[in-house]
Amino acid sequence: MATPSIACIGIIGKHNNPLHISLFPPHSKDRLKFSFLLSSCIDIFEIRALNKTVDQDLGLLQAVDERLAMYGWLTNTGIKFIIVVDMEGRPVPGEISSGTAVTGLRGADLKPAFRAIQTAYIRLLQNPFYSPDDHTPLEIANNPLLKSSQITSKRFIDDMRRIGDAWAPGVTNI
Amino acid sequence: MDGPASTSSVTVEYYDPSNVFQLLSPGLLSRLPLQNLHWKSSTRPLRSIASLHVDLVPSEENLHTLPLHLPSSSPQLTSATEKPLSSTPNEGEGLHRTHSEGQGQWQTVKTEGGHTQPKGFTRDRRHQIPGLRKTPYLKVFFLRCDDNETYKASSRKLLREWLTDHTSSSQTGAPSNTQENHDAFEWLIVHVVLPDTPAASQPGPGASASGASSGTEKSSSGSRWPGRGSSSILEKIRADFNGTSKSSKDRVAQIRIPKCDLPPHLLARSSPQPPSPYESAQDLEKAWADMMAKFRSLILTSFDLRVSQYEEDIREKDSQRGLPGWNFCTFFLLKEGLLRGFESVGLVEDALLGYDELSIGLDVMIREQAAQTDANHRSTFLPFTQDLRERLTSILDSPSRELQQQSEHTEVDGPENDAASLLDRKNYRDLILSSTVSVFDFRCYIFARQMELLLRLGTTFPSRSTLLSRVRTHPAASQSEYSFHEDPRHTSSSAGKDATEDLMTLADICHRAVDFITSASRLMKADLWEGYMNGIRLSTADVSSDPEREKSPVEGAVSEVIENLVLSWTFSASQHVLARTLTRTLSGRLEELNEAGLPADDSASVDTQAQSVSSRASITPSAKIDKSPWAEAASANAKASLEAITASRADLILLKRGVVEKLANKRHWPVGWDSVEVGENESSLTGMDNVNLDDIAEKGVDEQSDEKDKTELPEPSASGLSDSELKTAVASEIQLCELHGDLTEAALAHFRVANRSNSVEKLLADMAAFKFSLRDYESCAACLKNLSTSYAEKNWTSLEMAVLKMQAKCLLEVGQIEGYAKAVLKFLAKVIATRQIGSIGFGGQALQSQSDEMCGRNEAAGAAFLDGHGCMIELIKHTPSLTSPVAVPIDQFFEAISVDNYLQHFDDRDGFQVQLRLRYLLDDSLAAQKVKVRIVDNSLSQPREIWLQNDRDVTFVRGMNKLMVGANVSCPGYFTVDRIIVDAYNIHFVYERRKEPVMPTRLLRQSDSHTSAPKSKEARILCYAKSNALEANIFFSRSIHLSRSKSVDIEISSGWNQVVSGQIRIRSASAGLRLHTAEATVTNGSLILKDKPKAGVINFGELSRGTHTAIKIPYGLETDPIELSFKLEISYVTEKGEFLFISNPTIPIALPLGVNVQDIFKEESLFSRFTINAAGAVPLRVLGSELKSSPLYEVTSECSMLSPVLVFPKQSMSLIYRIAPRKIDPKVPGQEKASKMPLALDISYRCLDEDVFHAVEINFLAALRDSAFNKYSRLLLPRLLAHTKQMLTPQMLELIGLTGELELGGFDESGWNDIIQALHISDREGLDQWLKDWYKTNPTISLSTLDDPSIEQTSKLPIHAIAIPVEVPQIQVVHTAELSILSPDVPSSNGIDVTVSIGDVLPADIRIRHSRIWDVDRALAGKGGSAMGDRPLTFVYEVHANADHWLVGGQRQAHYSARENEAKVFNLVLIPLRAGHLLLPTIEIKHVKPHVPTAQGAAPGSLDAIPGGHAAVNPGGGVYNPSRASWIHNTSTASFQSSRRPSSSSTSSTYPHHGASLPGQAPAPGTGLGIDFPPSNPMLDARRRSSAASVQGDANALNVTCETDYKSLGQTVLVLPDMQTTTVSLDPARPGSGAWLMQGDRRLVAGTAGDA
């Protein structure tokens, strides 16, 4: 038993192309699995986008199993942030049961993490060397110089790592 | 009734002492359920209850007497209501007791709080959870009272007793005990009137007033009550039991049973009564309606009472929340009572809302608890679930490892196995009531309730369905569901066939279920652990327990069991929800899909399955939905709800699948993608084993080998699995996999319907993995077919790669090598692409891992799918069997592709090579057989291309590779790399240059395109031949005979090649140019032309080293171009191989000179003056000219040219030749033919520009030969010459012509940079310097060197020779005419002007004679041979005089006839009219074709002369223009123009053309020089005419051409005014000059006066 932790942070672009995927232990090696998960939950974004109007925080997208749950956040520009939470999270030695494991997460628990991601993303956009238009599938198909839509900014990647490591239920400031 | 749940109806208790319910029930039940209730409470908006089910329950008292079976809804009772609490008998008992002792009990319960022992609680807890009881909302007394007597005697008492029994507490009891309102009810007395009874004749409720007078009533009922004597039983009852106050409700109703409904045994005892007047159908119906209305209102009243009571309680409880000791459970139960109430009246939504609130409340509670460490507060909920713990311990205690059977046995025993009861199998309410509920149970309960409510919302409402069916039968509404005004929810659900499911609600269930199950399973796990730890704590309570100590050995097994329990629970819970939400619509839809695509049995037929899968895969989800006829019928709303339900159901299925996957993973059975990776590892990639082990280690398994894991793992994991399906599946690998596959398939089907494309893709991938593990590669490939592209479109690189790799494997297995190759190549390209961005995956993790790990060791999961190691080698192994090559873009595998922009010549042969560099990106080396580079030159109108190729195999290794590609081709020009192909065993890596927008090259002047600088910076290779390579050039033929066809010369110099054989392919690149290669001849050298297989191709033989040869090829032209373009290819074979020379030369064909000729006939000779001028701007150097004599004519020239004459455009050169006819001996044969040969003027000349080029070339080459750059001569020289050509402006040429020197200009102006940049870098500097020096040392180049015979190159001096055919005009007659003034005063015409005065009369005579020696025909045929012969010919002369100058007297015009050399003299008188030098009048002589009759009359020498003559005088200039045309060798177009003036001769206009006419050769229009030929052969023409004349039989009819040699031409007479005085008037007023000659006095001379 342990506290929930972030298992994966996925940034998905406007055209449903992955911009960034960070994995966190103990799931660091399940890239394929999480890629599949992230790609399939785009559907939910699409459904929600039809119904929901303004709110960026889409809350719980899908409970994958008793461990993993996906939470979504949709920016105004169509960028999708997905956090996969591992409810069992990191093993904490000696600890047996905690309230959160029993009650589950509240939607608000993830807000700080999403905010932090958004901040990081905004900072990325402010980077003059990052052109979001280069990170669309169309552009990549047309421009042979662009090999991938991945975000390569080291700072952004570090930010993601930091958020993923720092977040825990109840943490309000990341 | 298709079963509303028992909780969704209202209980109505009836007491039926006289057993009339049986009679009533048909009518009553048919009117149930109650329709359209409207409930308005104070706190809520108006709620409408569309229908309310009523459970009619006999009261306890009734049961003893009449065990009636009622068709109530008991079969639908849920398990909860099956418990003793809600079972009907107990209910009744409970009710009874409530009334008797309820008050006291309530008090005790209240004092006890929630802490009573469960065992002794059965009675009292009803008060605690009031809402749970099915207490009746309404109690009905069915009274049978046949007459008033009976009523009085017994019925009233009965009623009163009943009423006091039941209503004492609620209606009339003390309002202080508000708790009673929880069970508030109303009562109703129904008077059942049987037919043929006295009561039946009494008026009904609607007619009480009118019925009072009825006699029958009096007689029958007999009023015993004063003032009420007339009242019926009904009225009596009303009076007795309805409240006294006005506001009180009417609680009495009456129903009459019609006679026909009466069973016979009841009829029997009826006494004969008159038929009741109140039995009409309307009355009956009215009575019923009245009763039902009472039912409704009374039920609502009691409901309202209850609700308000509950709400009050809840408010109270809620306000106490903050107080210590507040119990959530109590609150919960209280609120639930309200919710149950809602539910029972059909306000399901309200109930659901309440449960949601409760759920949140529970969350809050738990959170608060968790926040508080205080143990006291925890006590609200149990920390673990008792029975779960029991199960756990039982499983743990049973020696499961050894005896699998037993563990199964115990599980089977457990009642929990029933999936349907899984969620609500326990008596949760008891637990809650006793506050001994665990959180897990609590949640389960809430969810179960929510689900139940939702199901009730979602599934059928009978009333609606019937209503709907009724509406549907109505024709107007039958078509469209929309016309039926229902709430939207219903509309959406009704879209299905006759489905009444509300799919949205069902979807909501599934959605909630997913959330619930996942969180609850988490809870369960925690619960179990807690229970387990608790157990340990209890058992080892005394010993200081250290959980850590005990953990290690046992905990593994425990966690295993716990895990299994949880998984099993998850599985069956999901299954349960799925089963509950499987609606008809949905199943139908899914079946449809299954029929379309999914045979259920996996093993049945692989082929059909593959097909089916592929067919499904090929349909895009969106399209599929649209096409389905089912979906067409459905509205958008229905579609949305269908999508929602299927999607959420699919999520549930995925939950189930997740369980299976986990179980399989534990056993290391291949399921899903993980399994495929394992397979990969085992099969081929030994390097991955380590990674895999790490992976396992991380999962908490001891670090052991794979094998050991496998043997050990299956054992512990089976216990704890309670779900039967799971249990059987777990037993064997195949079954588990199949279960997994089935679930995947089911989820896939659901997602397809749900239109969730991304999820469908994911599941397709899973499906593929499943098929892959089954080794069903074909269907696996089919699944993957579109997946990779779809992922690629969205840039899901890692997914795409995984899919691609699997696809590749499948295709390889299936044998589709091509698809395999494509997939592998795509995959490898992705491998490279991802590596290029610095990581195998995305983002930081990978970056990190790459820096941490060794390069090449990738992440474990999916790494097998992302690793490209060895793929290329394997691919190459398979590709040779490909039938057609597979092309891939080269930049996916190579980068930094560059071709050196300078070429390197081969050392031993012609041709060149270029270095190609590329960086190969894969780890696997790549052996390529061929590397081909195509370079093209698009600057010309016809693009040229050269393929360069490597000469030996190349093996690319990772990193930069260099290789040389070359071609045995010489083709000067700028080339760009257009295409690169690396061919490795049928895999073509292709580089294709991006197409630029097409340059309008055709608009560029071609001469420019050679020299134009590179337009862009892209790599352009400047191709040029080695200086000693074979070279070929095309020139316009240097010796031209204008009358013959033109030709071009191909000059070939072999250079260092010993050519064995060769082929010239020359094609015209100009429109209208036809090359007559068949007539090609060698003009120079010893070359042997072998054969000319077809037009444009010439094969030639040996050409030894260092020789020059020239081949002349005639050509014809259809148009008139300035220059000609050719495509020249010479392929030649030497010992070194086969070579190709390509060139696209363009040569100017305009002749640089023009020749004009003027002919002047004299009697004996003809003087021809040739004017040679430069046609263009280029001065000419005429070296010599000659007009050769012919057999007919003798040519003499007064001067011969000794030195070259320079002819400038404005300074022409004239040559005069005297041509005289020879005496011809007509006897000699062949002369006639010879005579036809025209004379030929041969001119040899050089053009100044060519001289300049030559001089430059000599100079430059001589200098170059001494330098190190001789190898570049073929590159540099054309450039220099081209530049020189640009410099040669007309002014420059003129200057050069005058000075004989060329100023070269500077280095900088010459634009050498382009060329220098195109060379190898080592030579650039030196060449640059050398060129600069050369320019410095040679500022000017003297042309005089050309004429220096010591220089051998002089021989190469281009001397042009042109032969111009010159034809002597065909003239039969040449007249010699002379006008002489005979005045004695004047001196005879000796060249000095005669001086006369105006008005003098000058006698003059004309002497005319003619000669016929120019008549060639006559000369040839002899004197008699000519048609003309020696006969006299008739001529007419005419004197032309300017009327202003001369007054002509005498015969101005006269016919005369004359023989040859016969002189005729005619007299004239001339009077000059003006002063000044006056030209003598001119004379024109024409031949007259006499009329036959008049010809005889026209005697020779007759004086009927008429004015005539040959217009020959140009009055202004005095230039003699011989009337015969001068022909001009036209300057620019080199065409001859016959500019002969139209003859004014009256006799003939058919003056034969001559000059450029070519006897014996048909004119070829538009050929070569564009000579304007006369329309037909003049000779033939003449002959035709002569023959025509002979037909006439008159020689005079012959057309005779004549020329006149007028000897007096240009002679003048000086005329003087001969005035003595003149008077001039100067009057400015007059118009004109104002000067006016008034008068003149003649000089009086005696002689002249006398003459006058």
Image (spheres, rainbow, N blue to C red):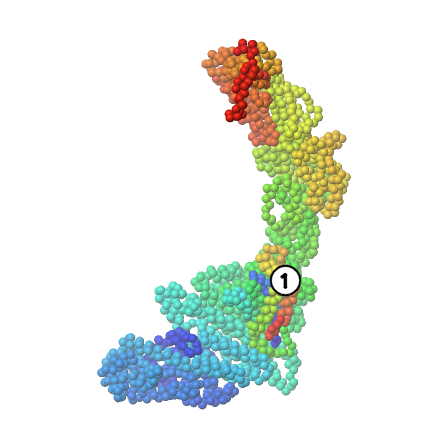
B747, B515: nearer the viewer: B515
How many numbered tags mark residues here? Answer: 1
- Quarter holding residue A148: bottom right
Q: Is residue B501 above or below residue B1493?
A: below
Quadrant containing the N terminus of chain B is bottom left
Residue indicated by mark 1: A127
At a point 43% along the width and 89% down the height, the residue shown is B101
B1017, B540: nearer the viewer: B1017
- Quarter holding residue B1185: top right
At a point 55% along the width and 82% down the height, the residue shown is B382
Left or right: where B490 falls relative to B1049? left
B1122, B1269: nearer the viewer: B1122
Q: Where does residue B45 sit, x and y in percent of width and height?
A: 43, 75
Crowding at label 1, few (<14), some or many (≥20) Cα neighbours within 10 Å? few
Residue located farthest toward the right when viewing the structure as drawn? B1266
At a point 62% along the width and 23% down the height, the residue shown is B1169
Amino acid marked by disc 1? Asn
Q: Where does residue B203 sit, x and y in percent of width and height?
A: 27, 80
Q: Where does residue B283 sit, x and y in percent of width and height?
A: 29, 76
Q: Chain of mark 1?
A: A
Q: Where does residue B755 sit, x and y in percent of width and height?
A: 50, 64
Confirm whether residue B1135 shows in the render.
no
- Quarter holding residue B1577: top right
At a point 66% along the width and 54% down the height, the residue shown is B895
B1130, B1624: nearer the viewer: B1624
Q: Secondary structure at mark 1?
A: loop
Left or right: where B264 falls relative to B358? left
Q: Is residue B548 above or below residue B885?
A: below
Confirm whether residue B1146 shows in the render.
yes
